[in-house]
Image (cartoon, grey):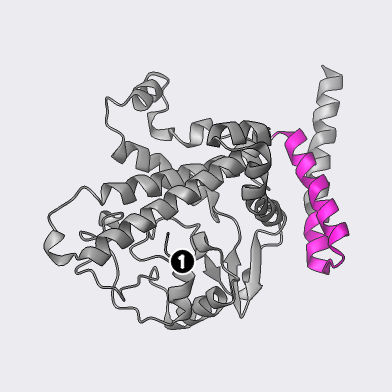
Amino acid sequence: MARDWSDDLSKGEAVQGGCEEGNVGRMHASCSKPSRTLRHYHGRDPDDIRRVRALAAQGLIEHQNAPRRCRPRRFAEVGALSEPDTINLDPADVKYPRRALSRLAVCSSGAELAEQAAGHVNTTSDPWGDAYEFVEYAARTVATAQELLTRAVVHARELGGSWADIGDALSITTADAEDRYREAIARWEEALDAPWAEAHGVVYSRMPVADPDFTIDYLDRWCLTHLAPADAARSTARRHGVEEQMVSTGLPQHTLLTEMTSVARTATYLTTRGVCTGPEWEAYQVRKADVYARAKAQLRESYAD
């Protein structure tokens, strides 16, 4: 069974070291010497670490948002923290449609899993390992694979896939598939409407990808450094002139229809939630006015043609 890192956070284990960014995904090569109490918190200051522990202890941070040992600093979506007055009141899909965000979450998990899996191949640091380290690292790799599967199910639903399709792919019944991933879909829907939350003086991301632009840029470069030049996908991208945009080039872009659908969903969320602050309503009105103005302009252009 995969280890729940929130338990480690709640126990208040000491921070004893970090990881080199260039060695992400390697159990031994990325840390000077493995230790059961070694935890890497992405360079956060002690106050942030204490607040994260408090959040994890109360179950306010998802497993995928809790810091993990030797986890890449480069993945901005993990445990993003800021001061409470910087919270963004816009929904998550202002710049990118929800289908692009769900696909990007799959891309992010796939890259992380690939780097974690590569860490099992290297034997040069085996003298510093022990039985616990090998099994624990394998368990974390499995946990990342399970996270990838969950994100793939979310994306499948965004593509219009039915629970019957998902059940067939997993060799389980339709009812079992829906029961297994119902909560993940619910969390995804809630995070789309309110991607940032605040607790104990910490603002944290509820989305699997907190900064899409950063993640897209990183994953475009990741493909160049991790896919061999003769790789089929890279060769195809090269022929189409998008070798340096192997992630960004295929992500769906907003249309006026998807933007208007997003605005309508936000209105429903704000009105049905029962509590709507002034800034939230103002942010919604500003976005609504912008989208509707562009829609009217497009209609006028189409009539003129």
What is the quadrant of the C terminus in the image?
top right
Q: Which residues are magenta?
A: 255-284
Horizontal and vertical percent position of residue 294: 79, 37
* Depth order, front residue of 1/123: 1
Residue drawn at point x = 54 percent, y = 49 percent:
212
Residue drawn at point x = 66 percent, y = 33 percent:
164
* Depth order, front residue of 215/34: 34
- In the picture of the structure, the residue carrying the numbered disc 1 is 4
Against 13, residue 184 (above or below) is above
Question: Residue 302 is drawn in which quadrant?
Answer: top right
Q: Main secondary structure of the magenta part?
A: helix
What is the quadrant of the N terminus in the image?
bottom left
Left or right of 153? Residue 127 is: left
Task: Indicate the amino acid at tag 1.
Answer: Asp
Against 181, residue 280 (above or below) is below
Disc 1: CA contacts within 10 A as few (<14), some (14-19) or many (>=20): some
Residue drawn at point x = 82 percent, y = 61 percent:
282
Residue 167 among magenta residues: no
Left or right of 106? Residue 273 is: right
Horizontal and vertical percent position of residue 296: 85, 34
Q: Secondary structure at mark 1?
A: loop
